[in-house]
Amino acid sequence: MNKYILMALLAGFLLAGCKEKVEPLDVKRFGSVTGLKPEKLEHYKRLHANAWPAVLKKIKECNIRNYSIYLQKIGEAYYLFSYFEYTGANFDADMKKMADDPETQRWWKETDPCQQPLPETAAKKQIWTNMEQVFHTD
């Protein structure tokens, strides 16, 4: 047998045994909705087109992955749909960590005035309304 073929086979066997098992993450999925003030549309888009690196870093530190915000106009009103996956072990603690972060607070001072909460959420002094997941598939 050619020595190069033998070396390739041996390397293949050795590497096959080195594959690391990856355990699936315990993922919790979140969807939420809020309105967007029409006069703030372009400002909101500009902010998110150039999201602050410190804010993006904090999102990752707080175990949030696959975070997206979508925009939809319905009639004359604009709505934002937010989706993210949480992979941590203590959601409340991670959300407090994010809320306590000075750079995130500064970001929210820019984004919050752009948003128009749904009435039931505004009554609770909140911005985003959590949504019920009714279907998911991988």
Image (tube, grey):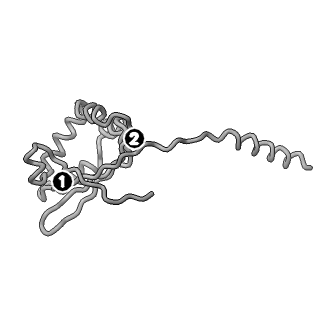
Q: Residue furthest right?
A: 1
* Residue 12 image position (x, y, % from top left): 75, 45
In the rendered image, which residue does mark 2 sit on? Answer: 87
Q: Residue at x 12, y 46 (%)?
A: 113
Q: Quadrant of residue 41?
A: bottom left
Residue 93 versus residue 111 in the image, above or below: above
Element at label 2: loop
Residue 122 versus residue 62 in the image, above or below: below
Give, as a three-letter code, the residue at label 1: Thr
User: Left or right: 57 with respect to 105?
Assistant: right
Q: Residue at x 20, y 35 (%)?
A: 105
* Residue 83 image position (x, y, % from top left): 31, 52
Alpha carbon distance from label 1 to label 2: 24 Å
Q: Residue furthest bottom?
A: 75
Q: Residue furthest front?
A: 134
* Residue 116 image position (x, y, % from top left): 12, 53
**Crowding at label 1, few (<14), some or many (≥20) Cα neighbours within 10 Å?**
many
User: Left or right: 111 with respect to 92?
Assistant: left
Q: Quadrant of the C terminus?
A: bottom left
So how many labels did they put on this image? 2
**Crowding at label 2, few (<14), some or many (≥20) Cα neighbours within 10 Å?**
some
Q: Nearer the viewer, residue 41 or 13?
A: 13
Residue 34's label in the rendered image is 1
Give, as a three-letter code, the residue at label 2: Thr
* Residue 37 image position (x, y, % from top left): 12, 56
Q: Earlier in the sequence, mark 1 or mark 2?
A: 1
Q: Quadrant of residue 78?
A: bottom left
Residue 101's label in the rendered image is none
